[in-house]
Amino acid sequence: MTENKILSGFSKLDQSQKIELLAQRLNLDDTTTECLRSFELSDDRWQTIITDLSENQLSNYHLPFSVAPNFIINKEWHAFPFVTEESSVVAALAKAAGYWAKRGGFHAEILGTEKKGQVHFSWNGQSEKLQKHFSEIKELLIKEAAPITQKMEKRGGGVTNIELLHLPQILKNYYQLDVSFETCDAMGANFINSCLEQFGKSLKSFVMQHDDFQAEEKQLEIIMAILSNYVPDSRVKVWVKCPISALEDDPAKAKQFAEKFVRAVHIAHNDVSRAVTHNKGIFNGIDALAIATGNDYRAIEAGGHAFAAKDGRYRGLSEARIENDQFWFGIEIPLAVGVVGGVTTLHPLAKLAMQILQNPSAKQLMIYLAVAGLASNWSAVRALVTTGIQQGHMKMHLSNILSSFNLTDEQKQAARLYFQDREVSWSEVEKYLKENAGN
Ligand code: MEV
């Protein structure tokens, strides 16, 4: 019976007890404890910060902390920190940065910073009646949320708009308070959620206490109050452009490449199968920078994918065109990020990532994320329409394969040289190593 297997009180055990219990239950081998311990930090100050980030922490999970220099954005030089498990991503980003640095760099513009959240509620009454009282309700909401909003208002942010929406097409008696926020340099999740929960309480008490409402109209039910990760009005636009002739040394090749690139982006804009993979390539860059800076990449992804489907059909997020012999490639993408509070100011490497970025504002970080997205998209589509993706991927994959064998640096170097212009596959590497054993 599976019920007999349920572990109760697991979270109350200390770390060693948790490891011991799991090792026993799952028949993990003797090296488990040693392996988990060896990935912990020797400096207790840092380790405590990491341990406290999550429940049931057993060890630390390491990924490379990398950097790609030479991102020129609005004429300024930047180095970007990245954290990703995918071997080819940082190489692709660095390549795109270097390529566009010689062609005017990336151009960027913030299109908005509005964040949203909703109080979802049901109410049994005439919607006109609620609407009639809405200006009074709004006044009360703002007044009663003042202790939460005061600090944010001092920083130049706060609640910027509240609307009442009646949505019977979704659910009978269903309404929303649709609220807009400015959260300045914070991602603002806690601020927004606290405001919304308070708004829910104030709204409920208004209808309960107001004489104009009958007994059944006083039954207002708050279903939930939560921020939305759909932030189409917190948006950034970044682009690159250059004369077609500047794309390649050979002008004929340059024209052919530009046209093929534009066609590839057009396919992603119109075909969902391609759009998903195309956008995945964009998020390769965005996520790696978001993770490095301790930002919530799931929120960024969810908002980005929803925006990709804003006209009822999922599309590629970037656009490319040729106009008067000029090549243009750009992206508009919603991003809600913070540079104060949360993991960004807690995790020692996220803090260092922010220093590498020269401690940007939230608006600057939005731009950097979008640039990383466009850069990784550029490299992926460029490879796809020229050499194919496997050439670059396999070069990086070779390092991973070689790491699985117990090789000296010289042997690895010799293998890299051998596979420089040969197809890389696990079996080919194995065959090569067998034939060259002892060399
Ligand atoms: C692989 O991580 C990402 C790509 O598939 C993106 C793309 O196809 O555009 C190469």
Image (cartoon, rainbow, N blue to C red):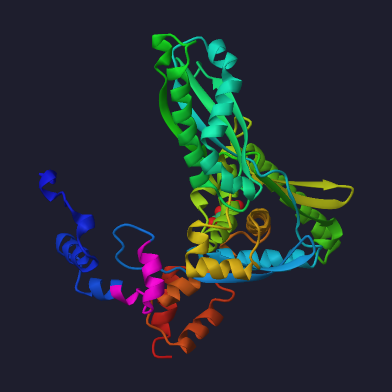
Question: Residue 311's spot in the image, x, y percent?
Answer: 63, 31
Query: Residue placed at 49% from the left, 31% from the top?
Result: 199
Which quadrant holds residue 391?
Answer: bottom right
Characterize the magenta stretch by its predominant secondary structure.
Answer: helix
- Read off the magenta span: 37-52
Is residue 132 a member of the stretch shown in magenta? no
Q: Residue furthest right?
A: 324
Question: Residue 144's spot in the image, x, y percent?
Answer: 51, 34
Where is ligand 1, by quadrant?
bottom right
Q: Quadrant of the N terminus?
A: top left
Which of the two residues, 411 or 239, is positioned nearer the viewer here?
239
Query: Residue placed at 15% from the left, 60% from the top?
Result: 25
Question: Residue 68's spot in the image, x, y percent?
Answer: 63, 70
Can I make out residue 373 in this image? yes
Which of the two residues, 256 or 6, is positioned nearer the viewer here?
6
Question: Residue 331's spot in the image, x, y percent?
Answer: 70, 48
Is residue 46 a member of the stretch shown in magenta? yes
Can I make out residue 395 in this image? no
Query: Residue placed at 55% from the left, 73% from the top?
Result: 422
